[in-house]
């Protein structure tokens, strides 16, 4: 990563971020052309799980070339240029957090593995429960497990980037927080909490 001040290497922070993100984008190659697929996903035990059909363009692309890149992004506050007390457009930016993983995709064929992947997805999307646990031995899931494609991304490298003003001087950082407090949106509240958390970690 070119800007090392934005990189977060804490595995627990990566897990927490991916647990919070609702969807990600998988980049594949299909018929020699770039092909991006948006998926719901779950991150468990170092793997990114997703599901889909056993046939179709996505399945064919994975079968032909399992290499992939995966990206998940969470936007934070938009920072307009005039927050920097200038008429130039240059300071305008968007604060965000993102994970990028590079690796390859494996199709899970064992029923138990498929049940694990789908259970991870359900636990993430419906943590309140309200359904019978997905178990390969449960007959209500037999056909579903057979017909559903379940995949896992095994990453060779994973990077977590958070851009929230870490590169700013103390004075600019403080003024920016003042502007965001005045604007007072829900996104500002969330971003200010993130900035304060990062600031506290830097001071340790």
Image (spheres, grey):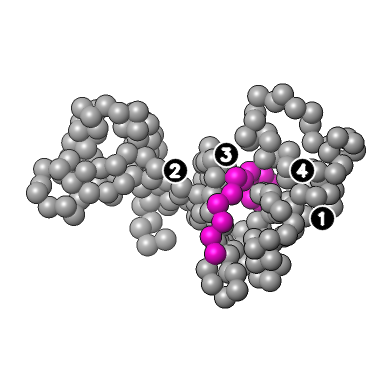
Bin the neighbour count of mark 4 within 10 Å (Cα to Cα): few under 14, some 14-19, many 20 and up. some
Q: Earlier in the sequence, mark 1 or mark 3?
A: 3
Closer to us: 157 or 171: 157
Q: Residue at x 54, y 40 (%)?
A: 22
Q: Which residue is mark 1?
A: 109
**Total marks drawn?**
4
Q: Which residues are magenta?
A: 35-48
Quadrant of the image occupied by residue 184:
top left
Against 6, residue 102 (above or below) is below
Say whether residue 40 is magenta. yes
Q: Which mark is residue 19?
A: 3
Q: Position of residue 109 (x, y in %)?
A: 82, 55
Say whether residue 79 is magenta. no
* SS for callout 4: helix
Closer to us: 97 or 132: 132
Residue 12 makes an appearance in the image: no
Q: Residue at x 22, y 49 (%)?
A: 92
Quadrant for the N terminus in the image: bottom left
Quadrant of the image occupied by residue 156:
bottom right
Q: Earlier in the sequence, mark 2 or mark 3?
A: 3
Q: Position of residue 187 (x, y in %)?
A: 35, 33
Q: Which residue is mark 4?
A: 116
Q: CA distance from mark 1 to mark 3?
A: 25 Å
Q: Earlier in the sequence, mark 4 or mark 1?
A: 1
Q: Position of residue 46 (x, y in %)?
A: 65, 50
Q: Which mark is residue 74?
A: 2
* SS for callout 2: strand
Q: Earlier in the sequence, mark 4 or mark 2?
A: 2
């Amino acid at each position: 990563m070119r800007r090392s001040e934005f990189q977060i290497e804490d595995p627990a922070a990566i897990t927490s971020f991916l647990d919070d993100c609702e969807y990600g984008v998988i980049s594949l190659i299909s018929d020699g052309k770039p092909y991006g697929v948006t998926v719901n996903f779950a991150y468990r035990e170092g793997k990114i799980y997703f599901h889909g059909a056993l046939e179709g363009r996505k399945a064919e692309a994975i079968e032909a070339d399992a290499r992939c890149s995966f990206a998940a992004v969470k936007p934070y506050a938009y920072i307009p240029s005039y927050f920097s007390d200038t008429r130039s457009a240059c300071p305008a930016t968007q604060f965000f957090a993102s994970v990028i993983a590079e690796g390859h995709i494996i199709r899970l064929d064992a029923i138990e593995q498929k049940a694990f992947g789908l259970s991870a997805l359900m636990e993430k999307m419906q943590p309140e429960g309200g359904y019978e646990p997905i178990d390969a031995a449960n007959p209500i899931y037999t056909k579903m497990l057979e017909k559903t494609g379940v995949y896992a991304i095994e990453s060779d490298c994973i990077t977590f980037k958070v851009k929230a003003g870490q590169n700013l001087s103390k004075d600019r950082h403080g003024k920016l927080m003042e502007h965001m407090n005045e604007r007072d949106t829900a996104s500002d509240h969330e971003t200010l909490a993130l900035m304060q958390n990062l600031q506290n970690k830097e001071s340790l």
